[in-house]
Image (spheres, helix red, strand yellow):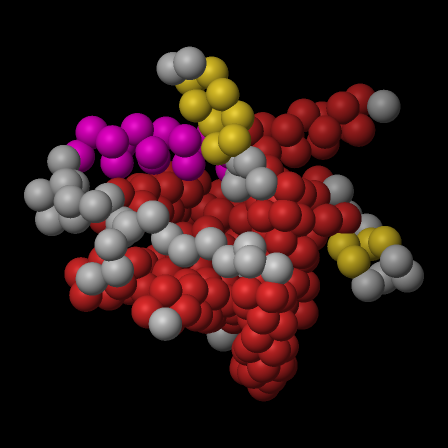
């Protein structure tokens, strides 16, 4: 019972870090005046946010790795044949999914465009963020840091070995990370569809991380899915 309480408490601490430190990164981004370069607040604020949140976790990973050198945070290419095959299959799947999703959105008049002017600066900056920062920063947190540590605390699998408990937990946390939290006044904003979307993608990214033993391939999956989704939205905004 004592061991269970300890593991549960440590998992809760990891959850608080994964949800709380990105909020702190937001305050750092708020403190920096990014409107001079990015007047529409399209890409620079969120870029600063993702850089800062990664900088919060990198020292923790380094310290933990020094203390527990056998832990594998995935900073190597791992099973590269399986990794690049996973990336290719996912990219084809996501392209097909995007086609159906946008077709359904237009058929039901539910397509939503971005609320910023689609000029070269905004389009290039936002696509650049999605390509270079979204995947690396978030996969560093939720897969490299999160799954690695939670798998030690809560080992085991579900669904006849197809789903690890750690992956399920981190996909849930990843979904919750897409809830907007505001304190002045306190308010929560979220989209149920987006939460489910993030949860499912979190499971895929986590599965890739575990099967390839590398965080680089989930980073690619994450960035690819975001670039395809954002790029397609921008394309239809121009039509």
Which residue is found at the position 78% from the left and 58% from the top? 163
Instruction: Using the image as rendered, state which of residue 217 and residue 175 is in the foreground.
Output: 175
Whether residue 92 appears in magenta in the rendering, the answer is no
In the rendered image, the residue lying farthest to the left is: 36
Instruction: Using the image as rendered, state which of residue 107 and residue 99 is in the foreground.
Output: 107
Magenta stretch, overall SS: helix
Instruction: Give percent across and percent down for residue 43.
Output: 27, 51
In the rendered image, the residue lying farthest to the top is: 185
In the rendered image, the residue lying farthest to the right is: 160
Instruction: Give percent across and percent down for residue 39.
Output: 15, 44
- Rendered-image quadrant of the N terminus: top right
Which residue is found at the position 47% from the left and 54% from the top? 112
Instruction: Using the image as rendered, state which of residue 237 and residue 220 is in the foreground.
Output: 237
Instruction: Using the image as rendered, state which of residue 139 and residue 94 is in the foreground.
Output: 94
Looking at the image, residue 90 lies above or below residue 57:
below
- Rendered-image quadrant of the C terminus: bottom left
Residue 118: image quadrant is bottom left
Is residue 120 left or right of 166 when viewed as pictured? left
Which residue is found at the position 43% from the left and 23% from the top? 182
Residue 9 seen in render: yes
Residue 184: image quadrant is top left
Looking at the image, residue 93 lies above or below residue 133:
below
Residue 227 seen in render: no
Instruction: Give percent across and percent down for residue 124.
Output: 24, 65
Is residue 48 left or right of 164 when viewed as pictured? left
Is residue 157 left or right of 233 when viewed as pictured? right
Instruction: Give percent across and percent down for residue 84.
Output: 54, 82
Whether residue 20 appears in magenta in the rendering, the answer is yes
Q: Which residues are magenta?
A: 17-32
Looking at the image, residue 136 lies above or below residue 53:
below
């Amino acid at each position: 019972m004592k061991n269970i309480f300890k593991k549960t408490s440590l998992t809760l601490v990891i959850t608080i870090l994964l949800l709380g430190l990105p909020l702190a990164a937001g305050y750092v981004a708020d403190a920096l005046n990014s409107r001079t370069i990015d007047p529409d607040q399209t890409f620079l604020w969120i870029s600063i946010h993702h850089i800062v949140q990664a900088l919060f976790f990198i020292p923790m990973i380094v310290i933990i790795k020094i203390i527990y050198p056998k832990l594998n945070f995935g900073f190597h290419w791992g099973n590269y044949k399986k990794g690049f095959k996973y990336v290719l299959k996912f990219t084809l799947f996501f392209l097909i999914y995007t086609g159906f999703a946008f077709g359904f959105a237009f058929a039901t008049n539910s397509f939503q465009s971005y609320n910023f002017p689609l000029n070269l600066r905004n389009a290039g900056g936002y696509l650049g963020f999605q390509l270079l920062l979204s995947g690396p920063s978030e996969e560093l947190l939720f897969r490299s840091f999160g799954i690695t540590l939670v798998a030690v605390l809560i080992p085991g699998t579900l669904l006849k070995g197809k789903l690890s408990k750690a992956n399920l937990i981190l996909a849930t946390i990843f979904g919750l990370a897409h809830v907007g939290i505001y304190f002045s006044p306190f308010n929560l904003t979220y989209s149920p569809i987006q939460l489910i979307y993030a949860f499912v993608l979190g499971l895929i990214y986590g599965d890739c991380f575990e099967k390839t033993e590398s965080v680089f391939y989930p980073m690619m999956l994450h960035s690819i899915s975001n670039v395809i989704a954002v790029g397609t939205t921008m394309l239809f905004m121009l039509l």
